[in-house]
Image (spheres, rainbow, N blue to C red):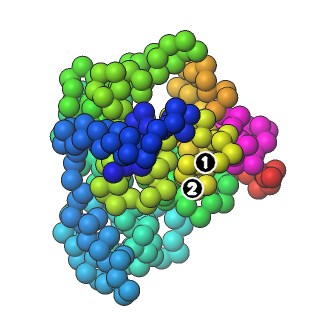
Amino acid sequence: MVTGAADSRQTNEVGMTPQEFAQLEDYAEAIVRKLQLPPCPGILADIGRELGKEHPDMQRIALEASRDVSSSATLLKTVNSAWYGLTHKARSVQQAIAYLGLERTSLLLAGLLLRNVFPSSQRQAMARFWQVSTQLAVTLSFIARVLERPDRDELHTFGLFRDAGSAVLINKYDDYDPMAHSPQTEFGPSLTELEQARFGTDHAVIGAVLARDWALPGDMVDAILWHHADFVLDMVERPIEVRAVEMIAIGVLGDRVLERHRGIAGEDGSATAFGAALRTLGLEARDYATIEAEALSALCALEGGAQPTLRLTSLTLH
């Protein structure tokens, strides 16, 4: 079961017995299972098994990864990019995995394989989804780099998977398009509320089940599940670990950057979530303003513009 699925994310306020809570979780996951989620790719399952061993066989994993020509080529290209700054380029998948380690390789491959598991589609909704999820992944990884966090690869994968439940719904329903949803107002329904009314679940729950099935880290699964429950940022006693809360907070900052990049106004509730995200990360507003400027430059570079320069050398952290 996915802990805290769907409406049970607010059970602390309505008060449910443990039995009722478990029944609601079972019901929510049963609905998700009917959507026929993409199964975990074999290479990720193999890596997961190796990670569970006392002495993982990195050579065997490299051999398995090499059999997927597309993924192995993209893995090498990514590791050899300027982002990683290797003095000597990796010439084989085995060298790339040796540099990254199995855990980081698993995270990177999960992101690379996500696109492959959905049918090829010319639908505009799917094209927009891939564009936005790629932009979000790059932005979150960039912010993590600026904040000197050690988990920038994990945040990149979180950016790709955070809204992956929407990709499932786009492929399942021809008339579903999350980007066509009008920004939430104070009195209007949110996207997740509309999804719950129509499907009995929402893209956050779907994405969390998918991430768990793909053996992604538990904190990431929780962050995906709770990423629309912004109130968790200000809770004194949080139902999820601090690392998951920080992922959600960095995601809020990433959303703000993408809003600016696309030239759209934020939702009515985004200002409250933005302030909570800054507090969670110990950032001042002026620090974020500099981060935003650099992140926008990074997005321009991603789309063929000038390369950004990383000028953030002294952030005021608390």
Find out whether the residues at labels 2 and 1 contact each other: C-beta distance under 8 Å.
Answer: yes
* Residue name at image x 61 percent, y 55 percent: 242
Helix, strand or loop for the magenta stretch, by majority:
helix
| The magenta stretch spans residue 288 | yes
Looking at the rendered structure, the kind of residue marked 2 is Glu
Secondary structure under tag 2 reads loop
List x then y, in percent, for residue 189.
Answer: 46, 17
Depth order, front residue of 243/4: 4
| The magenta stretch spans residue 80 | no
Depth order, front residue of 195/266: 195
List x then y, in percent, for residue 75.
Answer: 35, 63
Residue linked to disc 1? 238
In this rendering, would 112 be left or right of 241?
Answer: left
Front tag of 2 and 1: 1
In this picture, which residue range is highlighted in magenta?
274-297
How many labels were placed on the picture? Answer: 2
Looking at the rendered structure, the kind of residue marked 1 is Arg
* Residue name at image x 29 percent, y 39 percent: 27
Depth order, front residue of 294/58: 58
Residue linked to disc 2? 241
Q: Would you call the spot at circle 2 few (<14 residues within 10 Å), some (14-19), or many (20 or more)?
A: few
Secondary structure under tag 1 reads loop
